[in-house]
Structures are given as C-alpha cells and as structure tokens.
Image (cartoon, helix red, strand yellow):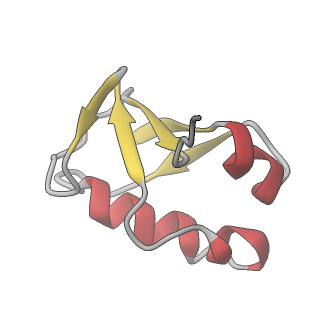
Amino acid sequence: MELDVLFFASYRELVGIPKVRMTLAPGATVSDLVDQVRARGETFGRLPDRPAVAVNRTVVPHTHTLASGDEVAFLPPVAGG
C-alpha cells in the first residue's frame, strides 16, 4: 500500500523535505511506518523512535493500522510560554 508521510516544523528542517511517499505491506501499523522512515538513514534516522503521529489529521497510537492512501504526519513537540 502507498501513503504520504508529511514532516512538520523542526522535523521538516531535520529531514530536509516536507513530504515523502512510502510503500508498506498491507496491515502495517504506525510503528512499522516509523521504523521504515527511520531506516532510510541519514537525517531520517535522527527522528525520534516514538514521535507523535496523526493519520488523516487525527492523532493516533503507534498500534493504529494504516490503510492505502492514508496521510501520515510526523508532529514535533510543541513548547509554549
């Protein structure tokens, strides 16, 4: 299955691109996707092991099963004051 992975704010700066298209096996979870993204090496490997992730604009746990065509966003920590 294919899906789009978006990187926001500091994660976009870290990996150097706003979006990448990924192919995963059917039944893959968010955790599987995070592992595959980090396995791309270089700056992708510096992403956290368990980042906050939204699928189709809803924050989900890493056990969430993905579907073809999903839009997955890596959400960096937010600090305020």
Q: Nearer the viewer, residue 14 or 20?
A: 14
Image-based side of 57 in relation to 43, left or right: left
Residue 69, percent across and down? Answer: 38, 26
| Total residue callouts | 0
Pick the quarter of the image with the C terminus: top right
Residue drawn where x is 51% and y is 70% of the image: 48
Compared to 63, does 32 lie above or below? below
Compared to 45, does 17 lie above or below? above
Which quadrant of the structure image shows residue 21?
top right
Residue 14, percent across and down? Answer: 78, 58
User: What residue occupies the far top of the structure in this picture?
Assistant: 57
Q: Using the rendered image of the protein, determine whether residue 60 is visible from the camera's viewpoint.
A: yes
Residue 12, percent across and down? Answer: 74, 45
Pick the quarter of the image with the N terminus: top left
User: What residue occupies the far front of the structure in this picture?
Assistant: 81
Residue drawn where x is 76% and y is 71% of the image: 43
Which quadrant of the structure image shows residue 32?
bottom left
Residue drawn where x is 32% and y is 33% of the image: 68
Which quadrant of the structure image shows residue 49?
bottom left
Residue 71, percent across and down? Answer: 44, 28
Image-based side of 15 in relation to 33, left or right: right
Q: Using the rendered image of the protein, determine whether residue 1 is visible from the camera's viewpoint.
A: no
Image-based side of 60 in relation to 16, left or right: left
